[in-house]
Image: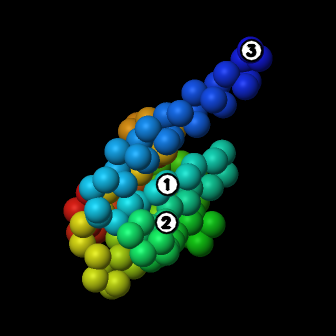
Amino acid sequence: MNKVKRLAKQQERRKYRVRNQLKSGGRVRLSVFRSNLYFRCQAIDDTAGNTLAAASSGELTGDAVRGCDAAAQVGRLIAERLLAAGVKEVCLDRGEYRYHGRVKAFADGARGAGLNL
């Protein structure tokens, strides 16, 4: 099998394994996506099947629009939006990404703003 296809298949398996473990919990799922330029997240209610809130590093202005600082700011932004919507407890859906670097900074930023992960 081609190396690129093999790695893509491993990522897909990892993503679904993490996501299926979280869906059984019944809490709102905080899904993250990171690319080279942006860091995006959205809060998904799986029982109702809708998105409660979303945030992206594209919304940020100033010096910290990339890297761990931007991810932490996005975490604080989504936490403020969820707390305003009345959601206090969520579970982090890290997808195929490791809990390291920007994903960890995002989670710490959301916890710092008062969200229970």
Indicate how the structure is coloured in the image.
rainbow
Relative to 34, residue 99 above or below: above
Quadrant position of residue 4: top right
Q: Is residue 1 left or right of residue 60?
A: right
Q: Quadrant of the N terminus?
A: top right
Q: Is residue 8 left or right of residue 102?
A: right
Task: Identify the residue at image location x=55%, y=60%.
Answer: 40
Give the percent coordinates (x, y) of residue 91.
Answer: 31, 56
Sequence-earlier tag: 2 or 1: 1
Q: CA distance from mark 3 to mark 1?
A: 29 Å
Q: Secondary structure at mark 3?
A: loop
Whether residue 43 is visible to the viewer of this picture, yes or no, is: no
Q: Quadrant of the C terminus?
A: bottom left
Task: Identify the residue at image location x=42%, y=66%.
Answer: 46
Spot the residue most to the right. 2
**Residue position marked by numbered label 2 in the rendering:** 42
Task: Identify the residue at image location x=66%, y=31%.
Answer: 8
Task: Identify the residue at image location x=49%, y=42%.
Answer: 16
Give the percent coordinates (x, y) of residue 38.
Answer: 62, 55
Q: Amino acid at mark 1?
A: Val
Residue mark closest to the camera, 3 vs 1: 3
